[in-house]
Amino acid sequence: MCSVPVPQAPLRHVAVTGGTHGNELSGVYLARHWLRDPRELRRPSFSATPVLANPAAAAACRRYVDRDLNRTFTDTLLVSRATPNDPHELTRARELDQLLGPKASGSDRAFDFVLDLHNTTANMGTCLLVDGAHNTFALHLSRHLQLQFPEVPCQVLLTRPPQSASESFSLDSVAKNGMTVELGPQPQGVLRADVFSRMRALVASALDFMELFNQGAAFPAFEMEVYRNLGGEDFPRTQDGDLAGMVHPQLQDRDYEPLQPGAPIFQKFSGEDVLYEGDSTVYPVFINEAAYYEKHVAFLRTEKLMISVPPLPPLSPTPTQVL
Amino acid sequence: MCSVPVPQAPLRHVAVTGGTHGNELSGVYLARHWLRDPRELRRPSFSATPVLANPAAAAACRRYVDRDLNRTFTDTLLVSRATPNDPHELTRARELDQLLGPKASGSDRAFDFVLDLHNTTANMGTCLLVDGAHNTFALHLSRHLQLQFPEVPCQVLLTRPPQSASESFSLDSVAKNGMTVELGPQPQGVLRADVFSRMRALVASALDFMELFNQGAAFPAFEMEVYRNLGGEDFPRTQDGDLAGMVHPQLQDRDYEPLQPGAPIFQKFSGEDVLYEGDSTVYPVFINEAAYYEKHVAFLRTEKLMISVPPLPPLSPTPTQVL
């Protein structure tokens, strides 16, 4: 697994992206607000750039127009030859890659950090999605946010399954580094003031952390509890592929809680319970997320780990220019 | 106001419709289940007909394809001349009118009762939508359901604003009589087992009531608390029509609770509160319903009334045929 290099210079190019999914309204309306009035995104050493990632989907209040934008940032797709019949989101992914990356070339002009804002219908409170345990900077940022927001669950989810060979595909992967924030529960197409305010405060706190880093602060090592994605569990289905049941009431809203083998996970429309057949305890997340029905995911199984995060060294002072 | 005649004969033709809005999944999946296995809908004196009202919208998991089906059942639209460019839902409304009505002619072959199943993202528990206080049969049915389900709020909403001259437009208006059931909160595109089970039990209980009526039961007069629709309240908006704010956290989830003049109803993105400027107490419902953003409705204002519902007389025994 490649380690994401710890930044050796101040973060100057930071983007905050909302509306990557057009019906996740906290990020849509924060991005629109900041595009009108970006003052909240300014810090002494940098100004974050607000981006409405998928304006067409946001205008239609749909997750996407043709395909899921946040699964479209693979090297393969980004460098593929453009054609007039490309799905809307492939064209938009290339535009965002030019704006925030480019990813494929590993170019130095890529943004230093992208913070991508999402909502979920699952009862997940605040969930910080980091690609893996090797991403020291994002884990320090996550730790900072956990300490700032102790009142609601603020968990870290390592998104890449162990031994995953698949390419990264999410918007935050086009920059040098990035992180995705998921806030819930919030229905698609609904803007809740409590969730909106929480997301706004999280972004402010994330920018404060980057400012501290830019000013030369050092951050010591720590131990951290994280959840690591082990893959999805599909709904029970009929022979023609339609749902044959739904998330069991004993599992609904129990994100991050232990699920033991033999516990009920689905209730079929016929009345029968479906039990969890895994051979060890897992910790489901994204339970009953609306957008994952079409992906055949009723929830993600995760394992709970303690990881050791190394210190984040202070930036070396800028060498004095010799005249 | 026209009174809906109390049935003079047993209800033989009853329909239970789901998926009038394709992303309100309790009704979608109940209808699909009953189309495969309708045994639950049988009673000694009748069998209710399950109908998936908008299969194309349900397949796409969207409220509608071209226009809101549940605003399309006006006499004007139903009798308009069909054209090849008609919106999908207008064509479908005409089909449903032929199946369950026809509404326009007042034909005797119309269904006796349509129970139309919906979900809302608002915190409304169980809400029974009856067109007006003149609908004695639907109010007796509502009373029966309230007594059967005391554990969650089960309120009656009279949907027609006072002095409204507008035509009825909802699916349940094509039959001789009907009622709409709204269950929430449930996000669009999500199927919650608790809400699904509640809707299933409500339908069973509604059919039981019709069976009691068909068997000749008499139902005495009663007093009932109801909420009557006074019209919608829009979000604060920017000059270009976009949202300038959201439902205030002090109003969110407080459906049916009194809202006093001067109380905060919206929080602008700029931070400012918007206060309720009405001159009397109202009782908001459908607070922050996802589907109403495009209708410029942040919530419906209602008044709370006590109404007297007259007795529902027993059916006369069928006259013995004279040979």
Image: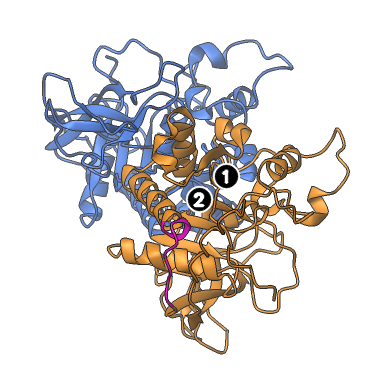
Chain colours: A blue, B orange
Q: Is residue B222 magenta?
A: no
Name the residue that disc number 1 marks: B21
Name the residue that disc number 2 marks: B118
Magenta-colored segment: predominant secondary structure: loop
Q: Is residue B89 left or right of residue A195?
A: right
Q: In the displayed structure, would residue B127 be above or below residue A118?
A: below
Query: The residue marked by circle 2 belongs to what chain?
Result: B
**Horizontal and vertical percent position of residue A190:** 49, 53
Query: The residue marked by circle 1 belongs to what chain?
Result: B
Q: CA distance from mark 1 to mark 2?
A: 7 Å
Q: Is the Cβ of the residue at disc 1 closer than 8 Å to that at disc 2? A: yes
Q: Is residue A112 visible?
A: no
Q: Is residue B216 magenta?
A: yes
Q: Is residue B172 left or right of residue B146?
A: right
**Horizontal and vertical percent position of residue A269:** 34, 33
Q: Is residue A132 left or right of residue A42?
A: left
Count of numbered circles on the image: 2
> Which of these two is toward me, A82 or B46?
B46
The amino acid beneath tag 2 is His
The residue stretch that appears in magenta: B212-220
Quadrant in the picture for residue B278: bottom right
**Horizontal and vertical percent position of residue A321:** 40, 36
